[in-house]
Image: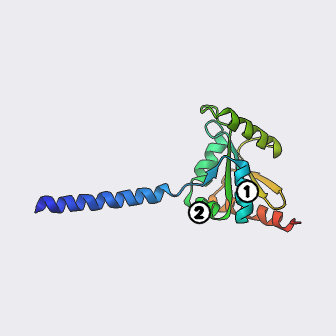
Amino acid sequence: MRTKILSILSIAIFGLVGFAFAKEQAKTLEWSTDYIASLEKAEAQKKPLLIYFTGSDWCPFCIYMDRDVLSKPEFIEYANKNYVMVLCDFPRKIKLTESQAQANEKLAGTFSIRGFPTMVIMNPETEAWAQTGYENGITPKSFIDTVTKAYEKLSKAKK
């Protein structure tokens, strides 16, 4: 009898841990590395694009941006709900495919990216865009406010 109770408790505990882990795993940004497909998705969903230019494995401020803003549940929920997210990474330790590296270079040129991290907020209807990046003391809330204000300004410039 005691073995049966322990077995049931073990199953219940593993089930709860598994559920909590699955729920936590779902809390990630929904990135795409395909700009054209993301642009089409943004137009279809009537959402702006948020394009993140980063040197994910070598740029200190990119690492801070990931740690302080992009990995936080508050920002993840906001971004996944309101934007189509594009990741344009320039890693040094990880080798990208040649086609991805070329696509990233081309996209960086299109938006005149001069440094990392840079976040481009783009209105897909008008192709108007704005840039922002990491600032000391940045929080998810302050970054959400910055991105929201930038998009509102772009929306006023519509047509």
> What residue sits 70% from the left and 64% below the top?
45
Scheme of image coloration = rainbow
The residues bearing labels 1 and 2 have C-alpha atoms spaced at a distance of 22 Å
- Of residues 52 and 11, the one nearer the viewer is 11
Residue 87, horizontal then vertical, whole percent? 67, 47
Q: Which residue is mark 1?
A: 40
- Helix, strand or loop under label 1: helix
> Residue 112: in sight, yes or no?
no
- Of residues 71 and 105, the one nearer the viewer is 105
**Quadrant where the image shows the C terminus:** bottom right
- Of residues 114 and 35, the one nearer the viewer is 35
> What residue sits 85% from the left and 68% below the top?
156
Image-quadrant location for residue 9 = bottom left
> Residue 19: in sight, yes or no?
yes
Characterize the local packing of mark 2: few (<14), some (14-19) or many (20 or more) Cα atoms within 10 angstroms.
few
Which one is closest to the eye, mark 1 or mark 2? Answer: 1
**Quadrant where the image shows the N terminus:** bottom left
> What residue sits 44% from the left and 57% below the top?
22
- Relative to 138, does residue 115 appear above or below in the rendering? above
- Relative to 60, does residue 23 appear above or below in the rendering? below
Q: Which residue is mark 2?
A: 77
- Relative to 152, does residue 90 appear above or below in the rendering? above
Residue 32, horizontal then vertical, whole percent? 64, 50
The amino acid type of the residue labelled 2 equals: Glu
Characterize the local packing of mark 1: few (<14), some (14-19) or many (20 or more) Cα atoms within 10 angstroms.
few
The amino acid type of the residue labelled 1 equals: Glu
> What residue sits 70% from the left and 58% below the top?
41
Residue 98, horizontal then vertical, whole percent? 68, 32
83 to the left or right of 77: right
- Helix, strand or loop under label 2: helix
Contact (CB < 8 A) between labels 1 and 2?
no
Q: Earlier in the sequence, mark 1 or mark 2?
A: 1
